[in-house]
Image: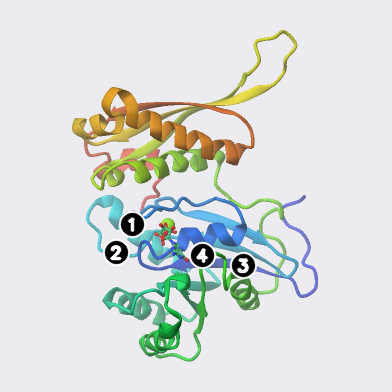
């Protein structure tokens, strides 16, 4: 399939940014939209670091979702880059999905983001996510609270559950109408623009987030050193292979290395096993995974290291 198909009459295509506080479910929504796990998610805030484009091609439109890191107060150079990249994205897309914590009443962080977006002229759609957690009796009241916060009838409000998929189809139909007429921007059969290596490293990072204590996740980075096909069977003539993945996990302190490896290597085995299973789903075949842990003091404040690990500058 060629990259730039001629436009079919009435076909639309464009970029849609998901903006919102950390942990509201932006990455979970993106995965639900495209029907595949392209963005990692976790109960720990600030999971998303790399800008990821996820692609959904329907009969009416091609939607390219830009999953952003949450907007929050910067603590490190890494934090500043995350916020700067979120602000930059706002100016580069056709529509914005403002994802809010539907299961909670609006807060000060929400007002901050709403005001940031009001200065823009592109269409904004509000998503009240985690609607599955909202008691039926509270639903109308909750929508009214958010309508008051937004104070703007031009912005539609959708109630969704990224977990169950409830409300997602209607949302997609609506956003599609906001996109300009245009051809495919990506081949119609792909769901992510990230190289496989990034997706693989993110699956490892996800397991680290899921398995370790608070202090580890934000000081960790994963670098894929090698991906290769190796023979699986020992018998002569057996051509089956598995994918061998060698990766290095970077941490900032020796104590963190100790936690990651765990007693007798138990923690690292658990992380590796979890990541390997996810990789097998992504690759659709057997995977052999080997993890190394390396201490690199202050990698988060080191511009050279950040660039090497794929965190964009500016
Ligand atoms: P992000 O930081 O905005 O990208 O948030 P994530 O997508 O990583 O999700 C944060 C947490 O919220 C994860 O534990 C998700 O499983 C959970 N979550 C996301 N969407 C929903 C939802 O619709 N309902 C419920 N109950 N949980 C959700
Ligand atoms: Mg995320």
Q: Circle 2 sits on which residue? A: 72
Q: Which numbered disc flags the more N-terminal residue, 4 or 3? A: 3
Neighbour class for label 1 at 10 Å: few (<14), some, many (≥20)? Answer: some
Distance from Cα at disc 1 to Cα at disc 4: 16 Å
x and y percentages locating residue 256 in the rendered image? 23, 35
Distance from Cα at disc 4 to Cα at disc 3: 22 Å
- Measuring 67% from the left and 55% from the top, which residue is drawn there? 186
Q: Circle 3 sits on which residue? A: 14
Q: Is mark 1 within 8 Å of ligand 1?
A: yes
Vertical placement of 178 versus 286: above or below? below
Identify the element where label 1 is drawn: loop
Distance from Cα at disc 2 to Cα at disc 4: 22 Å
x and y percentages locating residue 187 in the rendered image? 70, 53
Q: Are marks 4 and 3 in contact (CB under 8 Å)?
A: no
User: Closer to the camera: disc 3 or disc 1?
Assistant: 1
Which one is in front, 270 or 26? 270
Q: Circle 1 sits on which residue? A: 45
């Amino acid at each position: 399939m060629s990259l730039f198909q001629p436009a079919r009459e009435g076909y639309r295509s464009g970029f849609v940014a998901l903006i919102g506080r950390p942990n509201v479910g932006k990455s979970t929504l993106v995965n639900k939209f495209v029907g595949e796990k392209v963005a990692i998610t976790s109960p720990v805030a600030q999971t998303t670091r790399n800008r990821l484009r996820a692609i959904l091609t329907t009969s009416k439109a091609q939607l390219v979702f830009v999953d952003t890191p949450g907007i929050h107060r910067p603590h490190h150079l890494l934090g500043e880059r995350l916020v700067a990249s979120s602000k930059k994205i706002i100016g580069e897309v056709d529509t914005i999905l403002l994802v809010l914590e539907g299961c909670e009443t609006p807060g000060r962080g929400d007002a901050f983001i709403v005001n940031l977006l009001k200065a823009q002229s592109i269409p904004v759609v509000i998503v009240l996510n985690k609607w599955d957690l909202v008691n039926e009796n509270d639903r109308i009241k909750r929508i009214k609270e958010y309508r008051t916060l937004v104070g703007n009838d031009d912005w539609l409000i959708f109630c969704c559950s990224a977990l169950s998929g409830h409300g997602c189809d209607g949302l997609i139909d609506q956003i599609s109408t906001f996109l300009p007429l245009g051809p495919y921007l990506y081949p119609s059969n792909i769901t992510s623009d990230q190289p496989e290596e990034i997706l693989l490293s993110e699956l490892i990072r996800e397991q680290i987030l899921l398995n370790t204590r608070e202090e580890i996740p934000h000081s960790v980075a994963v670098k894929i050193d090698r991906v290769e096909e190796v023979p699986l069977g020992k018998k002569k003539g057996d051509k089956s292979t598995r994918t061998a993945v060698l990766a290095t996990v970077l941490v900032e302190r020796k104590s963190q290395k100790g936690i990651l490896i765990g007693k007798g290597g138990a923690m690292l085995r658990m992380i590796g096993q979890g990541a390997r299973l996810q990789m097998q789903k992504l690759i659709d075949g057997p995977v052999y995974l080997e993890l190394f842990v390396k201490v690199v003091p202050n990698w988060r404040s080191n511009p050279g290291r950040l660039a090497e690990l794929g965190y964009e500058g500016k």
